Amino acid sequence: MTESKKIIISLPESVLKDFDEILGKDDKNRSEFIKEAIILYIEEKKRYKLRERLISGYLEMSKLNQEIAEFGLAMDCCDYCSYEASLSECDNIDDNGGKKRRYILC
């Protein structure tokens, strides 16, 4: 077990009175309650810091993700235009390189 240290805290009389009333209902002593409260506070602070880091990371990555998506869309548009152009080009009526016919896409 880890070594424990004692701390001294000062509370206003009214807060201490409310604190003791609540502790009486929970069957805990002051030390147990304060220890649990400190542990919960530390855990909550860690969660908050992690959440802030995640938000910052998502915001930072959003610019890069948008650039990648726009690049992909531009490439798709280029491919689509090339596909349409190849459809509209001439094709051979026969396989011997004879006459060609043209298609006009509407």
Image (cartoon, rainbow, N blue to C red):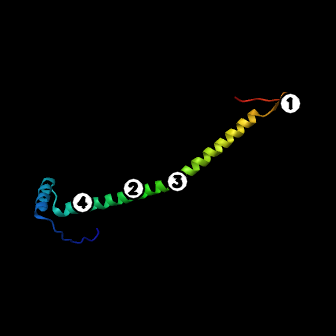
Residue for badge 4: 37
Q: Residue at x 42, y 59 (%)?
A: 53
Label 3 residue SS: helix
Residue for badge 3: 63
Mark 4 is surrounded, within 10 Å at the Cα level, by few (under 14), some (14 to 19) or many (20 or more) other residues, namely few
Q: Residue at x 26, y 62 (%)?
A: 38
- The amino acid on which the numbered mark 2 sits, given as a three-letter code, is Arg
Residue for badge 2: 51
Residue for badge 1: 95
Mark 3 is surrounded, within 10 Å at the Cα level, by few (under 14), some (14 to 19) or many (20 or more) other residues, namely few
Label 4 residue SS: helix
Q: Is residue 25 left or right of residue 44?
A: left
Whether label 1 touches label 3, CB < 8 Å = no
Q: Earlier in the sequence, mark 2 or mark 4?
A: 4
* Disc 1 versus disc 3: nearer the observer: 3
How far apart are labels 2 and 4 at the CA level? 21 Å
Q: Earlier in the sequence, mark 1 or mark 3?
A: 3
How far apart are labels 4 and 3 at the CA level? 40 Å
* Disc 4 versus disc 1: nearer the observer: 1
How far apart are labels 3 and 2 at the CA level? 19 Å
Q: Position of residue 64 (x, y in %)?
A: 54, 54
Q: Is residue 42 left or right of residue 8?
A: right
Whether label 2 touches label 1, CB < 8 Å = no
